[in-house]
Image (cartoon, grey):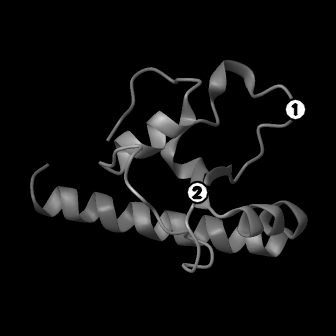
Amino acid sequence: MTISKISKDYKTIFYKYWGLSKEDSLSCWGCFQRPAIEIHHLKSRGFGGSPKNLLNVPRNLFPVCRQCHTLAHSNRAVNEEFKKELNQKIDEKEFEENENGI
């Protein structure tokens, strides 16, 4: 899925890409134990955001609980594991879409 306009609203981008509604409850993709209440940017936006919101793309958005979000910011290895997990999920999604002609 290609998003033609890069939006500031990264939460909308995330939910739309995964075919979810903001009302859907989602488990943390880091620990799978608590609700995901935040969306972590795997590549940090920094203070003040990125130019033209270029980091607000599905391959950079990872739903997490507060504890996993804090951990990802304090431990580079955890953040790298989250990147691998997200890339695997996206690759699987895109493979299924190609198989089904979506």
Label 1 vs 2, first from the N-terminus: 1
Residue 88 visible within the image: yes
Kind of residue at disc 1: Phe
Question: Horizontally, is 28 left or right of 65 in the view?
Answer: left
> What x and y, as percent, mark residue 20?
33, 49
Nearest the viewer among 62 and 92 is 62
Kind of residue at disc 2: Phe
Rendered view: 85 above or below 26: below
Residue that label 2 marks: 62
Nearest the viewer among 17 and 99 is 17
Residue, x 72% and y 69% (percent of image)? 68
Q: Give neighbour class at mark 1: few <14, some 14-19, many 20+ (Cα, 10 Å).
A: few
Image-quadrant location for residue 15? top left
Residue, x 83% and y 25% (percent of image)? 48
> What x and y, as percent, mark residue 60?
60, 49
Question: Horizontally, is 27 left or right of 2 in the view?
Answer: right
Q: Give neighbour class at mark 2: few <14, some 14-19, many 20+ (Cα, 10 Å).
A: many
Question: Horizontally, is 66 left or right of 20 in the view?
Answer: right
> What x and y, as percent, mark residue 25?
42, 59
Secondary structure under tag 2 reads strand
The label on residue 47 is 1
